[in-house]
Image (spheres, helix red, strand yellow):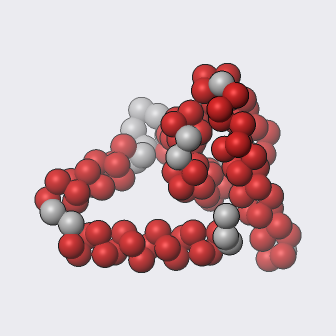
Amino acid sequence: MGTIQDFESFRRRLNHIISERGDRTMKRFFALDQRAYEPGRIDKKTKEMLGLAASMVLRCDDCITYHLLQCHRLGVSEEELFEVFSVALVVGGSIVIPHLRRAVDTLVQLQEEMDTDA
């Protein structure tokens, strides 16, 4: 994976193009996705952890990175993240291991950025 900034820049740029050119179905799906993570009976932090676990089981590296960044921004601790990783591994099985490695690599990058900013 490139840098976290590269990931976020790519995502922003392509989401902008999709929002300009996409049809009503795409726009509605993106809005539905955004609304699903808004706080309700379950808080946003928990929903992002659920999204992270589901993304790991579904083996979507972009989704894993996105939810990991959201979890980080919401103050999910390393210990909580490793519990999420454990749940995903048990549910998804050994096929999740390569995605777990990439998730941990992203987490290390986030921690290194925090150390640099401090």
* Residue under the point 65% across and 32% down: 95
| Quadrant containing the N terminus in the rendered view | bottom right
Residue 110, picture quadrant: bottom right
Residue 54 x/y as whole percent: 52, 35
In the image, taking residue 38 as reference, residue 58 lies left or right, namely right
* Residue 103 visible from this viewpoint: yes
Residue 102 x/y as whole percent: 71, 51
* Residue under the point 15% across and 63% down: 23
Residue 117, compared with residue 114, is above or below; it is below
- Residue sitting farthest toward the left: 24
Residue 19 x/y as whole percent: 26, 70
Residue 76 x/y as whole percent: 68, 47
**Number of numbered tags placed on the structure image:** 0
Residue 46, picture quadrant: top right
Residue 96, picture quadrant: top right
Depth order, front residue of 65/116: 65
* Residue under the point 36% across and 43% down: 36
* Residue under the point 46% across and 34% down: 42
* Residue 75 visible from this viewpoint: no
Depth order, front residue of 39/102: 102
| Quadrant containing the C terminus in the rendered view | bottom right
In the image, taking residue 33 as reference, residue 100 lies left or right, namely right
